[in-house]
Image: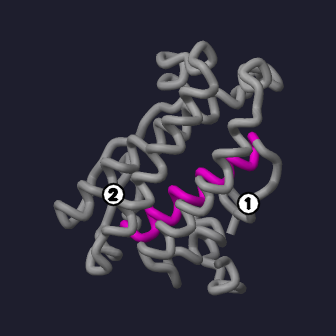
Amino acid sequence: MLSKCKGRVLHGSWLSNSVLCYALGMSFPEIASDLSQTVLACEPLLRQVRNADATFRPAAGKWSKKEIVGHLIDSAANNHQRFVRAAAQGSLDFPGYEQEKMIAVQNPNVASWELLVELWSAYNRYLAYVVGQLPATCAQTPCVIAGRAPITLLWLAGDYVEHMKHHLNQILGNRFPTAYGAKA
């Protein structure tokens, strides 16, 4: 998928190369398929992680695997609202969220790993369906998140998947190509 945009870099932007590829060449159905395939590939691998291992924090100030999945669940919930509201309203002005505070309040380290993985998987399977239903006419819908510069709904959907892959790589090792967080 990344080869569609090979060599296209938007200099001076906060867009990563891989996310830029979504904005330049992928459709909602292709993004939905990528999301679905990623979830299907990851769920059995995540289920192999032991609860005790999922609770371990690798260093002070670093999240455990449970906290990373908790963050991905928060991301799914926030982006679900973003996707649907942007498509329904024709534009979006949505607040950001304070991920550290949200993790602290929810304390996913106390939840069972099985519960977290099941919720993450089910929510993302549904989000894949939702993204696949977004009309192509909504691709350029402007979205403002936390007062930042506007992005398109298509870019937002692609960024969601790339962000998820970045965090799944933190849990499972580098299994998914992504330049999420890379400087353009």
Q: Is residue 55 magenta?
A: no
Above or below, comparing residue 21 to residue 49 in the picture: below
Please tell me the numbered disc located at residue 83. Answer: 2
Residue in the picture at 38% in, 64% down: 131
Q: Nearer the viewer, residue 9 or 121?
A: 121
When asked about the image quadrant of residue 95, the answer is top left
Quadrant that contains the C terminus: bottom right
Choose the circle earlier in sequence order: 2 or 1: 2
The reply, left or right, for residue 13 in relation to residue 105 is right
Q: Is residue 158 magenta?
A: yes
Is most of the magenta stretch helix, strand or loop? Answer: helix
Q: Which amino acid is tagged 1?
A: Phe
The reply, left or right, for residue 102 in relation to residue 49 is left
User: Is there a contact, CB below 8 Å, between mark 2 and mark 1?
Assistant: no
Can you identify the residue that label 1 sits on? 176
SS at mark 2?
helix
Quadrant that contains the N terminus: bottom right
| Separation (CA) of disc 2 from disc 1 | 23 Å
Residue extent of the magenta highlight: 153-171
x and y percentages locating residue 155 in the rendered image: 46, 68
Query: Disc 2 or disc 1, which is closer to the eye?
Result: 1
Task: Decide: few, some or many residues near mark 1? Use Cα within 10 Å; few <14, some 14-19, many ≥20.
Answer: some
Q: Which amino acid is tagged 2?
A: Phe
x and y percentages locating residue 150 in the rendered image: 37, 63
Above or below, comparing residue 82 to residue 183 in the picture: above
Residue in the picture at 37% in, 66% down: 153
x and y percentages locating residue 147 in the rendered image: 36, 50
